[in-house]
Image (spheres, grey):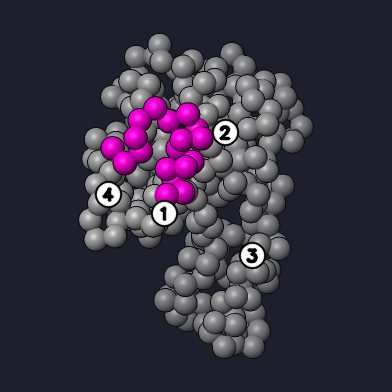
């Protein structure tokens, strides 16, 4: 396994060496079985000689589990406790790190629209996987998912009829361009890439659980360097700030939803 991950890093530049080993193992053996191979060594040989095999494995390693207004209580907390504190700013910058196919970025845009501040906000939605980013830019989602998404929206204290935000075409819901015009979808790898702006809110939910402690600490450092003074950090409900010295930089806004605020002047 170590040789496989090291070979991928050296040959292709993709660094999965500090991902959670159990998560990586499941995905590696899934690919081995799909390709009817007998060992990790055989997979490594194929990966190093066939870029298409690397692309398949790369997609296996990309975790793309998302939905609109996922965990409605989280979005309710954003609506009530976070976004009202940003409304006074002349412009707002939000980073969705690990945005997958974009459902949460569009959910954020709807929240901002309902609070009347979407026009002065730029949402940067990033992911390492360019395939899902292409899908996110389209704003097309399967129509059969709208029932669940509508329920999530209602339970997040949504203010309008959810169907007002999209039109229907060929079994797909197409979300209005008014929502996406202030969203910038871009490729960014939390493992290898650095900070690219200063943000008032960073949202990274249920991504760090796939990293080991060393990589989690590195990403937390990246987020700290990317947050403005008094900026907000929103993590997944299975994550937190369980690292030495993190408590000196943040204080909790919502413990249950794992939302924190950077202390003013914290370096």
| Circle 4 crowding by C-alpha within 10 Å: few under 14, some 14–19, many from 20 | some
> Which residue carries the number 2 mark?
73
> Which residue carries the number 1 mark?
145
Marks 1/4: CA distance? 12 Å
Q: Position of residue 112 (x, y in %)?
A: 38, 27
Marks 1/3: CA distance? 29 Å
Q: Position of residue 79 (x, y in %)?
A: 48, 25
Q: Quadrant of residue 18?
A: bottom right
Q: Position of residue 49 (x, y in %)?
A: 47, 81
Q: Residues at badges 3 and 2 in contact (C-beta under 8 Å)? A: no
Closer mark to the observer between disc 1 and disc 3: 1
Q: Residues at badges 2 and 1 in contact (C-beta under 8 Å)? A: no
Q: Secondary structure at mark 3?
A: helix
Q: Residue at coordinates 44% horizontally, 70% vertically from top-left?
A: 55
> Which residue carries the number 3 mark?
24
Q: Residue at coordinates 31% horizontally, 41% vertically from top-left?
A: 163
| Circle 1 crowding by C-alpha within 10 Å: few under 14, some 14–19, many from 20 | few
Q: Earlier in the sequence, mark 3 or mark 2?
A: 3
**Near-viewer residue (203 or 246):** 203
Q: Quadrant of residue 159?
A: top left
Q: Quadrant of the N terminus?
A: bottom right
Which stretch is magenta? 147-164
> Which residue carries the number 4 mark?
174
């Amino acid at each position: 396994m170590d040789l496989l991950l090291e070979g991928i890093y050296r040959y292709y530049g993709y660094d999965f060496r500090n991902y959670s080993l159990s998560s990586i193992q499941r995905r590696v053996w899934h690919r081995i079985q799909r390709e009817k191979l007998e060992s990790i060594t055989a997979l490594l040989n194929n990966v190093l000689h066939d870029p298409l095999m690397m692309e398949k494995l790369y997609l296996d390693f990309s975790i793309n589990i998302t939905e609109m207004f996922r965990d409605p209580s989280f979005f309710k907390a954003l609506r009530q406790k976070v976004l009202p504190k940003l409304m006074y700013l002349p412009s707002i910058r939000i980073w969705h790190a690990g945005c997958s196919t974009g459902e949460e970025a569009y959910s954020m845009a709807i929240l901002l629209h309902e609070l009347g501040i979407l026009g002065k906000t730029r949402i940067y939605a990033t992911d390492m996987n360019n395939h899902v980013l292409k899908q996110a830019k389209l704003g097309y989602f399967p129509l059969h998912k709208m029932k669940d998404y509508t329920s999530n929206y209602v339970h997040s204290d949504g203010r309008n009829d959810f169907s007002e935000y999209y039109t229907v075409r060929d079994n797909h819901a197409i979300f209005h361009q008014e929502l996406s015009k202030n969203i910038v979808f871009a490729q960014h790898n939390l493992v290898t890439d650095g900070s690219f702006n200063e943000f008032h809110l960073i949202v990274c939910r249920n991504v760090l659980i796939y990293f080991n402690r060393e990589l989690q600490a590195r990403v937390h450092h990246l987020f700290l360097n990317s947050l403005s003074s008094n900026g907000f950090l929103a993590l997944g409900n299975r994550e937190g700030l369980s690292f030495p010295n993190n408590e000196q930089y943040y204080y909790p806004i919502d413990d249950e939803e794992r939302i924190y605020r950077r202390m003013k002047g914290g370096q």
